[in-house]
Image (cartoon, grey):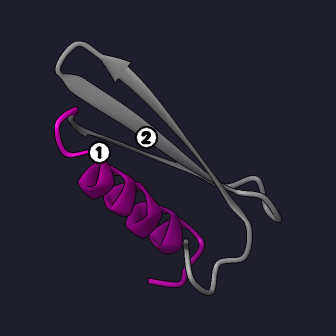
Amino acid sequence: MADGLGEVIVESTRNGTYLKVTAVHVATGTEATAVGPAHEPKAVERLAIVKLRRALGEG
């Protein structure tokens, strides 16, 4: 899913109308979190992965 990053664990938690998505890079343990509308789960997941890429210095 996260092309070029290796293994990434994605966890989603819904809180009312909001969705919190955390992406964890397995090899380094680096985490990135994004919060957005619960009706757009794929968009929030993409944002979390983009933030993870930045945290790893790949974006």
| Residue drawn where x is 79% and y is 62% of the image | 28
Q: Residues within 10 Å of mark 2 (few under 14, many from 20)?
A: many
Q: Tell me the residue at 73%/67% (across/down).
A: 7
Position of 50 relative to 26 (above/below): below
Q: Amino acid at mark 2?
A: Val
Which residue, as the protein is rendered here, is positioned at the far right? 27
| x and y percentages locating residue 10 in the rendered image | 57, 48
Instruction: Give the SS element for disc 2.
Output: strand
SS state under label 1: helix
Label 2 to label 1: alpha-carbon separation: 8 Å
In the image, what residue type sits under mark 1?
A: Pro
Q: In terms of sequence position, does the residue under pointer 2 or pointer 1 come before the other? A: 2
Task: Inspect the magenta stretch and tell me whether residue 43 lies in it.
Answer: yes
- The label on residue 41 is 1
**Would you identify the image quadrant in which residue 30 lies?**
bottom right
**Where is 32 relative to 36, above or below?**
below
Q: Given the current orientation, which residue lies at the most extreme top position?
A: 16
- Residues marked 2 and 1 touching at CB (< 8 Å): yes
Crowdedness near tag 1: few (<14), some (14–19) or many (≥20) residues, C-alpha within 10 Å: some
In the image, taking residue 48 as reference, residue 5 lies left or right, namely right
Nearer to me, 54 or 43: 43
As drawn, the label of residue 21 is: 2
Q: Residue at left 37%, top 33%?
A: 20
Vertical placement of 22 versus 20: above or below?
below
* Magenta-tinted stretch: 38-59
